[in-house]
Every structure is written in structure tokens, then in C-alpha cells.
Image: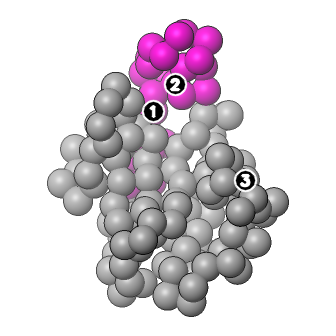
Amino acid sequence: MSYTSIDEFQAALPPEYRAICHALRDVIDAELPDAESKIWHRHPVWFLQGNPIVGYSRLKAGMRLMFWSGADFEEPELKSGTGKFKDASRLYADVEDVDIETVKKWLKKSRRIQWDYKNVYKRKGRLERIV
């Protein structure tokens, strides 16, 4: 299904996943007030100066919080993706699993540690560190 807004995305979720998203969205909006948020590739994503920073998506097992540059955060709770990109994520099955202080720490790192995903296609798949 295609969504036109984050509100629409969240409204379509089962109540337990909706609660997780509300908790995540509240802390992301508070910690990244200058970020642009929108639906991108069918999921809520926050951008700093056009570069994707954080987002979440629904999986069968729960809600996945993903940081595009999270593999370099050196955080054991974040599982690194596979392949050449620098993403890492955390899966939440229940809103009680969301530790707001930990998410805040990751969001602070997401501002300091960034790979340039905005221009990855121009560079033919090569990532460069920008912060």
C-alpha cells in the first residue's frame, strides 16, 4: 500500500505497532527538530539536508528502526545490515522494549556520523563519509 503521510502509515498499523511508532516518532521529532520527515520508499524517513538519517518500517516480527549510518555507531543493540551500505537497525516487538534514552543516544550519533546516501547514485554506489 502507498501512503502519503506518516500519519496515514501509522494509522494503517495494528495497535501494538502503532504504539511503537508513536513512541519512536515522538523521540525522533524531539531530537531531530530540523529534520525533514516524509514517506520515502513506502516508509517514514527523516532527512538532514537531504540525506536519509533514520526511519522505521513494519516487519512480521515488529517495527524496525533503521539508521542509514548506524553500522558506525558502535552500538551492540543495533544489528548491522548486509552488503556495502552502513545501515544498522533494531527490531521492536512491543512498545515496552523502546528505551527512549537509548534511542536519543543513537539519534545524537546519527547527526555526527553520516555517510552520504543522498549522492550514492551519482557516485555509482560508492559511499563517502560526510560527518
Q: Which of 62 and 78 is in front in this view?
A: 62
Element at label 2? loop
Residue located at (61% from left, 12% from top): 122
Most frequent secondary structure within the magenta stretch: loop
What stretch of residues is rendered in magenta? 106-131
Disc 2 residue crowd, few under 14, some 14–19, many 20+, Cα 10 Å? some
Q: What residue type is labelled 1?
A: Gln
Q: Looking at the image, is mark 3 or mark 2 earlier in the sequence?
A: 3
Most extreme residue toward the right, as rendered?
A: 4
The count of marks equals 3
Q: Looking at the image, is mark 3 or mark 1 earlier in the sequence?
A: 3
Pointer 1 residue: 114
Q: Which of 68 and 81 is in front in this view?
A: 81
Q: Nearer the viewer, residue 21 or 73?
A: 21
Disc 1 residue crowd, few under 14, some 14–19, many 20+, Cα 10 Å? many
Q: What residue type is labelled 3?
A: Lys
Q: Which amino acid does label 2 sit on?
A: Asp
Q: Name the colouring of the figure.
A: one colour
Residue 90 visible? The answer is yes
Q: Gap in Å between the C-alphas at discs 3 and 1?
A: 19 Å
Q: Gap in Å between the C-alphas at discs 3 and 2?
A: 18 Å
Up-down relation of residue 93 to residue 124 (above or below) = below
